[in-house]
Amino acid sequence: MDESLDVLIQLQDVDCLLREMRDPEMASQEERLGFAVEGISNLERTREKLASRVEGRLLQTYERMSRRFFRVIVPVNGRVCSGCRISLPTNTIGRNSEGATYEFCENCGRILYRR
Amino acid sequence: MSPATLSPTVEIPLLRQHLRKALFISELRTKRKSSVLEEMVAVLATADATRHPEGVLDAVRRREALGSTGLGKGIAVPHARSTLITERSMVIARSSKGIDFDSPDGLPTHLCFLIVAPPLERDPVYLNLVAEIVRAVRLAKTRQRLLEAPDFGTVRRTLIEAANG
């Protein structure tokens, strides 16, 4: 997997965890089940470090799209974008013009990765 | 261990749906928490639940860093969401020697349930599955039966009975 995409996926996973831990309902459900939840500031620092490793334009795209979509980076399932469920043209998956192995869904704009 | 709370909207037996022989480790080879998580995530890759185990392991470790998922009484339920998981999955592992999972009671963990799920918005099923496990293993006799079960079939039956009971 392309390194930028790998870091971006980690960033999305951290964002998902942060959202859950900041959601009072989710956080209290974790605590009711008996799980300790602390150290969110460390997770925020991890996010900053990951974000600093993503190329500027790609990070901007991710940040902009994450305001619109819960999941910006999604797997391609067969030839279908698992974000919008639309079939992709045959040349969508492959190297983009900068040589990276990620691409964007032409319909919804999400960033795609191969399973 | 705190009592589990199930959402009233859950109508399907979640635990039953997630019991897979390919995701069962009868006896863990390792006993350190970090390597146990690695061993369990590796099983997910072997069973084709992910093709990117390193990324899934990162997500599991990051959740664990927020606070131990060791619940005490020999049980741990590590859980995390990862972009690199496409379907919710559960790995069950046993350790007769016990694992130091930083549990609140300080006792070693003998039964470990790893749950991974994709990051879906407002997915109540993920934590409800965790809750169902917590409820199923609340009785000492169930935990003992799970540890002594000779095969996956017996583990499966024990968990289903306990979840229904």
Image (cartoon, coloured by chain):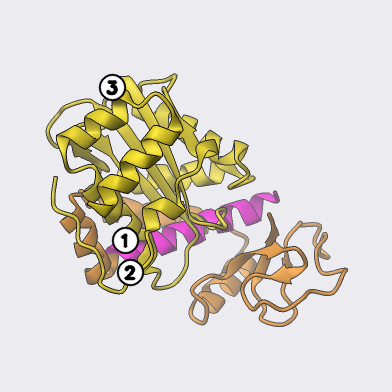
User: Hey, what amino acid is under mark 1?
Assistant: Asn
Whether residue A53 is visible: no
Q: Name the residue under label 3.
A: B98
Disc 1 packing (10 Å; few <14; some 14–19; many ≥20): many
Residue occupying image coordinates x 47% and y 58%:
A13
Q: Earlier in the sequence, mark 1 or mark 2?
A: 2
* B32 drawn magenta: no
Q: As rendered, which of B132 and A28 lies closer to the eye?
A: B132
Q: Earlier in the sequence, mark 3 or mark 1?
A: 3
Q: Nearer the viewer, residue B161 or B8?
A: B161
Q: In what element is the residue under mark 1?
A: helix
Q: Position of residue A60 (x, y in %)?
A: 57, 72
Real-space Cα distance between discs 2 and 3?
A: 33 Å
Q: Mark 1 points at which residue?
A: B128
Q: The yellow chain is which one?
A: B
Question: Mark 1, chain letter?
Answer: B
Residue on which the image places disc 2: B10
**Residue range highlighted in magenta:** A1-21
Taking the magenta stretch, the answer to whether it contains residue A6 is yes
